[in-house]
Image (cartoon, coloured by chain):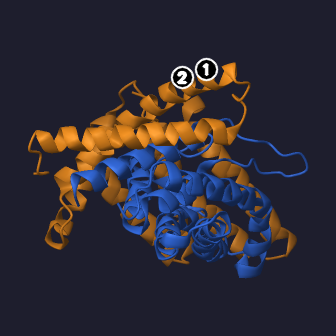
């Protein structure tokens, strides 16, 4: 399965996803609610030391962090250019904390574990008619559809190549959508035929 | 939520994900790459309607938050929703709803122009409406500068809305889902 989570297991992988999500939620809220420099410094220190303490490899870490780092650097330069050092410090501290903690969570948590944790968090929604089991099923189905879409796109492009249309977006998109919508209908009927009621 | 709602939502979540995995178009003179991803918002709303379209983008968002590299450039993870671009991610879900709602309202007399308006309102209007103030607040750059910065994406998004309109109208003829 393609996912961002590292295959090499670190001790952070073994921490339950629910706990990691709670830490991220608390730290993420704190960093935006406080202006206190000491609290901010503590949170920044925590966010930077966590990936180091887990010995996360730098390359995948950098790949996830880099786009945000470029944006944060641009914002810092922007605020400094306007002479607003306070904003530069706040933005850099807040965003780097949140991004680093979130990337660390993502790199050390399997998507399946995250989905299970989200199912548990969303469990109260059962009372407004959202079934966690149905949500989990829909998520799995979407993941399964992605390689199917690429396979069908490949077939259609082959077919349209004969007509010299393989570079036309519409000539590929239309048959792709019609075929996959029809497939979705067949699949719905197949699921209904097996008396699936979602729970 | 019926089985059909779930399967359609899963399909368009996958379509939106696949659009993000396509190679990005790097336009000369423009710093940011233009990706096909927001096309998914307009297509999901325009083809599935409000409820199922929003559900599709919610499924996509949940998968990305869970740590699949579904956003353009192989990014993903919960950080995308906490950082400066979080509002755009939220805007995707509500944008698909708005595009779908407008498309349903105009369904019986839908043409490319109306489909374009629905796509622009949801896929651009709603996405920017949530994304720009969020960016301004989180990055402390203010509404005005966040707005100017986001205008880089407007030409590409208008092009996508036009493409989505053509596709939505054609799908309405070939394999309509709304109103079935």
* Nearest to the observer: residue B25 or residue B175: B175
* Mark 2, residue position: A155
**Label 2 lies in what chain?**
A
The image quarter in which residue B55 lies: bottom left
Which residue is outermost to the right?
A: B29
Q: Tell me if I can see residue A45 in this picture.
A: no
Callout 1 touching callout 2 (CB < 8 Å): yes
Q: Position of residue B42 (x, y in %)?
A: 56, 60
User: Which residue in the protein does label 1 denote?
Assistant: A158
Residue at 34 percent across and 55 percent down: it is A21
Residue B150's spot in the image, x, y percent? 74, 66
Residue at 18% across / 41% down in the picture?
A: A191
> In the image, A133: left or right of A36?
left
Picture residue at 47% right of the left edge, 42% below the top? A178
| Residue located at (53% from left, 48% from top) | A48
Give left or right: position of A168 versus B76. right
Q: Quadrant of the N terminus of chain A?
A: top left
Chain under disc 1: A
* Position above or below: B127 against A115: below
Q: Could you say where residue B102 lies in the image, as x and y percent from the top left? A: 52, 74
- The hue of chain B in the figure is blue
Mark 2 closeness class: few <14, some 14–19, many ≥20 residues within 10 Å: some
Q: Colour of chain A?
A: orange
């Amino acid at each position: 399965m393609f996912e961002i989570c590292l295959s090499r297991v670190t001790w952070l992988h073994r921490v339950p996803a629910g706990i990691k999500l709670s830490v991220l939620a608390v730290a993420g809220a704190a960093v935006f609610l406080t202006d206190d420099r000491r609290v901010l410094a503590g949170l920044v220190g925590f966010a930077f030391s966590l990936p180091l303490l887990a010995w996360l490899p730098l390359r995948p870490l950098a790949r996830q962090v880099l786009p945000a780092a470029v944006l944060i650097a641009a914002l810092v330069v922007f605020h400094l250019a306007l002479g607003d050092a306070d904003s530069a410090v706040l933005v850099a501290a807040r965003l780097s904390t949140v991004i680093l903690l979130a990337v660390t969570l993502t790199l050390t948590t399997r998507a399946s574990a995250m989905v299970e944790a989200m199912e548990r968090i969303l469990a109260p929604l059962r009372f407004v008619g959202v079934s966690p089991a149905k949500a989990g099923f829909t998520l799995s189905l979407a993941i399964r559809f992605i390689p199917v879409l690429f396979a069908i796109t490949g077939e259609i492009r082959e077919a349209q190549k004969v007509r010299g249309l393989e570079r036309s977006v519409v000539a590929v998109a239309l048959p792709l959508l019609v075929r996959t919508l029809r497939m979705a209908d067949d699949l719905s009927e197949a699921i209904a035929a097996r008396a699936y009621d979602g729970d | 939520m019926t089985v059909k709602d779930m399967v359609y939502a899963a399909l368009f979540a996958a379509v939106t994900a696949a659009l993000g995995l396509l190679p990005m178009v790097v336009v000369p003179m423009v710093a940011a790459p233009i990706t096909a991803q927001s096309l998914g918002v307009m297509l999901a709303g325009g083809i599935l309607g409000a409820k199922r379209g929003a559900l599709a983008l919610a499924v996509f968002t949940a998968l990305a938050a869970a740590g699949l590299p579904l956003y353009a450039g192989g990014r993903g993870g919960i950080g995308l929703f906490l950082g400066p671009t979080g509002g755009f991610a939220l805007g995707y879900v509500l944008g698909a709803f708005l595009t779908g709602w407008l498309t349903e309202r105009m369904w019986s007399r839908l043409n490319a122009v109306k489909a374009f308006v629905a796509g622009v309102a949801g896929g651009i209007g709603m996405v920017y409406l949530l994304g720009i103030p969020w960016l301004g607040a989180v990055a402390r750059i203010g509404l005005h500068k966040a707005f100017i910065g986001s205008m880089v994406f407007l030409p590409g998004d208008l092009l996508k809305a036009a493409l989505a309109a053509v596709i939505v109208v054609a799908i309405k003829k070939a394999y309509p889902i709304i109103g079935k």
